[in-house]
Image: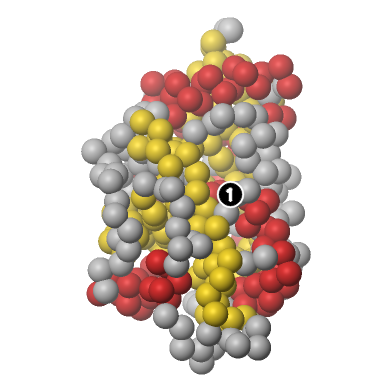
Amino acid sequence: MIIRPASSADGQEMLRLIEAHPARGNMSILYTRRPDAYQSYQTECPGAKIVVCTDNSGGLLAQIACLPRKLYVNSEIHSVGYVTGLHKADGAFINIIKMLKDEHFRSSAEQFFCSILDDNESVFNLFAKRGLFHAIYNYTTYLIHPAAVKHKRHKLQFRRARSEDATRLLDFYNNEGKRYSYFPVFSTKDDFSGLNVLDFYLLEDGAELIAAGALWDQRPFKQYVVVDYKGMYRLAAHCNPMLRALHYPPLPDVNTAANFAQISFLICRDGDHFLEQIMFGELATAGRGFDFLTIGSAAQDPFSNHLNSIRSLKFGSKICVCDYAENSLAPAGIIPRFECALL
């Protein structure tokens, strides 16, 4: 077996391996990267480190990626790597630990973390028993029909950002983002693929910017595709008009990319929770062209209380520190805010 850095020539084989392993459960979902998995990772994070394991004839047996980013942790900027995309061919005997520790996979990141769905408890236990992963937060992803979000009455001004707002937005995010651990650092308006200043929305009090957020459609490089429905979901998939009437997200057709956007980078002046609710309601209204909107929250984030009050489909996961490398970062009681679109 050969462990090596991935190349553009591996893109289709990587995609094949990803799509061979949908998430289990009554709603079998592919978190996929069509049309080319290698390019998808590079598009999402140009500094992506991707390692593959092949047999001696070049057949792909396993893959894993690390997406390094600059994040605020304990109010300071740190390089943190998100470990993702672990896929292994059925029946292949692979030393995943060796792949994690491979020199090609390592970067200058000060900490590595990953997210593991609660439905994948066996995977978590496998790595936790070996001392590789340590759960630090419980995280919930919410799929919300835009009409399920109640609009808060207010006298503030909500509008879509314009090109000339770019510098103002960067300053706002970097001033307010450091209030949270694991919130991304904004260095330019082009930091995030497929997202430009016109995808952001502003909440203003007169001339003062007091909240911001974005609607991020990642479907050109990353998709949710339902492979199969079982149990109650099989029945519900035939009742989308009723689901919409009840303000639940409609269930996508099988083998079709879901029509949704991420509510991303929601942040408010001074961490004001009431402003967050106002801004969230406005973003939901702006996103009514999508079947559903997605947002995530750690249990320790007070905003999760508001999200839990909204009718939604949701699934849980664990945010884990990857202890195969020395980790110099230990969040010191600051509210965590992981951007769901970057997980």
Q: Does 248 sit above or below residue 127? A: above
Q: Does 138 sit above or below residue 162? A: below
What kind of element bears circle 1?
Answer: loop
Q: Position of residue 171 (x, y in %)?
A: 53, 19
Report the side of 337 relative to 324 (left or right). right
| Residue at 46% in and 53% down | 107
Q: Does 290 sit above or below residue 124? A: above
Q: Amino acid at mark 1?
A: Gly
| Residue at 38% in and 73% down | 97
Q: Position of residue 152 (x, y in %)?
A: 51, 28
Report the side of 117 relative to 32 (left or right). left
Q: Residues within 10 Å of mark 1 (few under 14, many from 20)?
A: some
Q: Position of residue 206 (x, y in %)?
A: 57, 7
- Which colour assignment does the render follow? secondary structure
| Residue at 62% in and 29% down | 188
Q: Which residue is mark 1?
A: 47
Report if residue 262 is visible in the image: yes
| Residue at 56% in and 63% down | 50
Q: Nearer the viewer, residue 206 or 177?
A: 177
Report the side of 317 relative to 200 (left or right). left
